[in-house]
């Protein structure tokens, strides 16, 4: 037998061996869980979708039908949010200012709340009336983009191509972001 095999054979049946094997099992479990959780992870600022046509979706919110494809020809800041998301509220003032600063830009804020009354209360509390705000309780729109943890925003150009992804609350009045959007 080799040196390692001899050493393992000598350890077999000892307390040290049992502790070592338990540690190996824990490490294997942690590694497997990490690989499962990160496989296909697309939460980076340059997701696989960047440079591709944005997935189209239709959201029916009350008597309104909002279809992403209807905004072709405009720059779209597609913002996914939820009323239970504490970070989402931080973006509202600068998103509304952004809507006003760049005339050929549309802020489309899609909530994926499961409770319509919470959504309506939130919209009223934060007075979200200067941009397009809709509820998608079926989660079809956000799942089409692979978004499950708000806030996440996608910049979609006039041709319907995803150009950028932002994760977390942003200050949309940031000069770098404004310049980037104006150049699109």
Image (cartoon, helix red, strand yellow):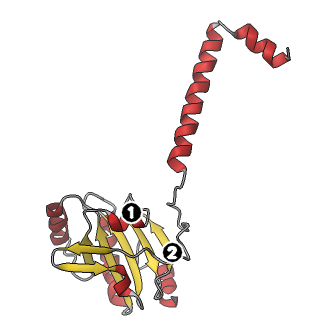
Q: Position of residue 20 (x, y in %)?
A: 63, 19
In the rendered image, the quadrant that contains the N terminus is: top right
- Label 2 secondary element: strand
User: Relative to residue 79, is residue 183 drawn left or right?
Assistant: right
The residue closer to the viewer here, 72 or 79, is 72
Q: Is residue 43 above or below residue 134?
A: above
Q: Residue at x 75, y 8 (%)?
A: 10
The residue closer to the viewer here, 42 or 70, is 70
Q: Is residue 154 above or below residue 33?
A: below
- Label 1 secondary element: helix
Q: How dense is the environment of label 2, judged by Cα within 10 Å: few (below 14), some, or many (20 and up)?
A: some
Distance of label 1 from label 2 (alpha carbons)? 17 Å
User: Relative to residue 33, is residue 123 drawn left or right?
Assistant: left
Q: Residue at x 15, y 78 (%)?
A: 63
Q: Position of residue 39 (x, y in %)?
A: 55, 51
Q: Residue at x 71, y 10 (%)?
A: 11
Residue at numbered disc 2: 164
Specify whether residue 48 is in view: yes
């Amino acid at each position: 037998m080799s040196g390692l095999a001899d050493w393992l054979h000598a350890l077999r049946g000892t307390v040290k061996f049992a502790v070592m094997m338990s540690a190996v099992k824990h490490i294997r479990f942690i590694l497997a869980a990490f690989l499962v959780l990160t496989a296909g992870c697309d939460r980076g600022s340059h997701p696989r979708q960047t440079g591709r046509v944005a997935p189209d979706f239709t959201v029916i919110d009350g008597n309104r039908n909002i279809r992403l494809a209807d905004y072709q020809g405009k720059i779209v800041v597609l913002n996914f949010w939820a009323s239970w998301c504490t970070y989402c509220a931080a973006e509202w003032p600068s998103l509304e200012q952004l809507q006003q600063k760049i005339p050929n830009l549309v802020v489309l804020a899609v909530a994926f709340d499961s409770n319509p009354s919470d959504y309506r209360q939130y919209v009223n509390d934060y007075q979200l009336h200067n941009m397009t705000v809709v509820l998608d309780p079926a989660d079809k729109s956000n799942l089409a983009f692979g978004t499950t943890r708000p806030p996440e925003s996608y910049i979609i150009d006039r041709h319907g191509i995803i150009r950028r992804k932002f994760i977390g609350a942003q200050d949309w009045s940031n000069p770098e972001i404004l310049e980037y959007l104006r150049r699109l």
